[in-house]
Image (spheres, rainbow, N blue to C red):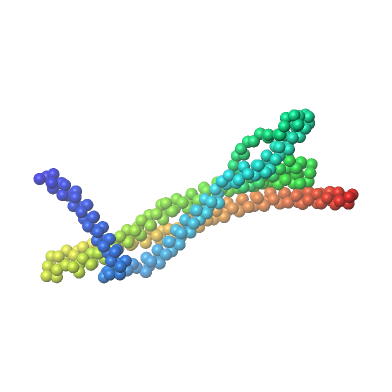
Amino acid sequence: MDSFQSFSQKINPFAQKLNRSFTQVKQWSQEKMGTATEVTELPKEYNDLERRFDAVRNIQQALVRLSKTYTAAPLALDMNQIGESIWDFSRSVSGKIQHAALGQEEAAGPVSPKTTEEPIPKTVYHGMGRTALKASETVGLEEPYGAALFKFGSIQEKIGEAKLNLDDEVLLKFTDPVQNNLNTSIALALKARKNVYSSRLALDATKNALRSTNPTRPDQTDQAQHEILKAEDEFVAVVEEAMSLMKAVVESPEALRNLSELVSAQLRYYKEASDLLSELAPEIDELQVTQEALYRDSHNHH
């Protein structure tokens, strides 16, 4: 007898939960079909706060996705294909020159340059720098264009290092904090909103149940009224909790602080890149003038 009573005590809460879920689903279905007689409206303040909260949540989700793309390492950058057109050519030329110097070119047959798979550059700037530096060797540093490629490649690698520093800063001071906010404060508010929706369905289902009670049975009517009051109290409590959590997200200065950190990190990066390019530009201009002078002299002699 005791074991049966213990089993009944365990199964009763489960049965109540199952019955509540069923009545909520029934209420939801009736609302979707437009046959529900009771639909409790949420306070205007709640609806307004919900819209403001969604705006903050949506922009933070979008900025996190974009910042991850912004700081992502390049995927291969087709560097192997670039290698075929630039670096393999450079190795081929170097190999032929060496064989010719030894008088072995014809005896050795076609040159088969040793190929090595190039590591993926850390940034696009590293890729441009590497390409320019290798090409400068092929063109020749004594040539204006070769010298310009060497200077350009060196600066691009420095900009690449600055970009890596920017990526680390953005991840540490923007992406991670915003993602953490999405996973904690915003996630809690979303869960509270689901509780509001569930509680509202339960309240309206309870109100509809009152309509089906027998008015000649006061005991049924009293029980139904008691259930409605209980559901209303629960509904008010979850609405207040959800509003409190959403308000905390909307009014928090954290989002603006994170945005400020992002702008500061970008400012440092672009300033460093600007300084490096400002140093490079006049040197490239000077080499361009030299190249044009050589070009004119060459054509004047012809």
Q: Quarter holding the N terminus?
A: top left
Q: Describe residue 279's horizontal placement relative to residue 168 as left or right.
A: right
The residue lying at 11 percent from left, 70 percent from top is 216
Q: Nearer the viewer, residue 101 or 217?
A: 101
Q: Describe residue 270's horizontal placement relative to residue 206 as left or right.
A: right
Q: Nearer the viewer, residue 94 or 276?
A: 94
The number of callouts visible is: 0
Pinpoint residue 142: horizontal percent, then vertical percent.
79, 41
The residue lying at 61 percent from left, 50 percent from top is 269
The residue lying at 65 percent from left, 42 percent from top is 83
Whether residue 89 appears in this view of the structure is yes
Pinpoint residue 113: horizontal percent, then vertical percent.
68, 35
The residue lying at 41 percent from left, 58 percent from top is 248
Q: Nearer the viewer, residue 287 or 25?
A: 25
Q: Describe residue 283's horizontal placement relative to residue 7 as left or right.
A: right
Whether residue 162 appears in this view of the structure is no
Above-or-below relation of 41 to 168: below
The quarter of the picture where residue 208 lies is bottom left
Residue occupying the far left of the picture:
1
Pinpoint residue 193: horizontal percent, then vertical percent.
35, 59
Q: Describe residue 298's horizontal placement relative to residue 234 as left or right.
A: right
Above-or-below relation of 181 to 230: above
Pinpoint residue 190: horizontal percent, then vertical percent.
38, 57
